[in-house]
Image (cartoon, grey):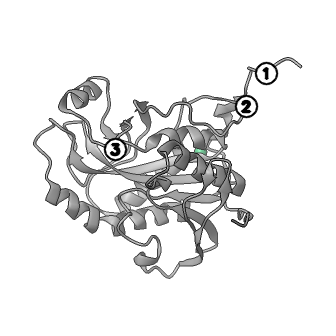
Amino acid sequence: MEAKKVPQVDFAVIGGSSTFSINFPEDLQRGDTRIIADALTFETPYGVSPPLKLFMLDKKKIITVKMHGWRGGIARADASRQVFWVFREAGVKKIVSEGGVGSINRLLRPRDLIVPTDYLDFSMRKDVSLGGAFLLTMRKSVCPGIRRELVRSAEAEAVGRVFDRGVYAVTDGRHFESPAEVEMLYRLGADIVGQSMCPEVYLAREIGACYGRMDMVVNYAEGVIKEWDYEEMAGIFYGEPGKIGSIILNTLARIEPEQSCGCTQYRKPSLLKEKT
Ligand SMILES: [Zn+2]
């Protein structure tokens, strides 16, 4: 395969299950978006990247990938590393991700939107890294600037209830959690459960990019409130992506590449240097 040069891009969108059923951003039929290139793949040290799309939102250039880059036959850790290797080469500064989650907090219900502020990582992908010699502090793992604009855009869209904080428990999947696991996550302080915030949040910090995300509740977690409904989940899957895509674009329209938010201060040079 021919090695392609990665374009320079300030902004990235990691699409998840909330936009999976549409062509993002074309299907939103907005006058301010224009596709530059589609189905771009790049050779990375972790294998060939998933297909990425490059588009303009007014004067901003944005790169996007569907479903976190996950695909059959590729380990999820490698898929994430491929995506973030491309983002690093592209010089991406701001990343907005989205996904569907199960509700653990008893106050939540399907179709609620949450902009998570912290996480508990129960995935088994902890050695995921791009090899950068950095000490990564996860004190404020979610960019306060992206978070503020996601909440503002979601509230302006009037899509229903929007929660501006929450703890996202990350599991490995691909199966959902058992009732006992959900009860454990509840006692530990999780509000929602899903499979994508980690390792994305670590990798974003490693490449020096700001990271924020928005998650839609697509089902009650097992054992919470009532048994979840497959039909309702399908209704959300096919019925809500336009709103989520619109919120993401409106958020990107309001954020700039500069990082006065302070996120970059949490990446320090590693102290574990070998003596030469
Ligand atoms: Zn930031």
Q: Residue sitting at 21 percent across and 51 percent down?
A: 110
- Residue beneath the point at 50% across and 82% down: 31
Rendered-image quadrant of the C terminus: top right
Separation (CA) of disc 2 from disc 3: 31 Å
Q: Position of residue 263 (x, y in %)?
A: 62, 40
The residue where tag 3 is placed is 174
Q: Which residue type does callout 2 highlight?
A: Ala
Are dots 1 and 2 in contact, CB under 8 Å? yes
Closer-to-camera residue (132/103): 132
Return the x and y of residue 6 as percentages of the image width and height. Answer: 71, 62
**Circle 1: residue type:** Lys
- Distance CA(mark 1)–CA(mark 2): 8 Å
Q: Position of residue 113 (x, y in %)?
A: 32, 51
The residue that mark 1 highlights is: 273
User: Does label 2 or label 3 sit earlier along the sequence?
Assistant: 2
State ligand 1's quadrant: top right
The nearer-to-camera label among 3 and 1 is 3
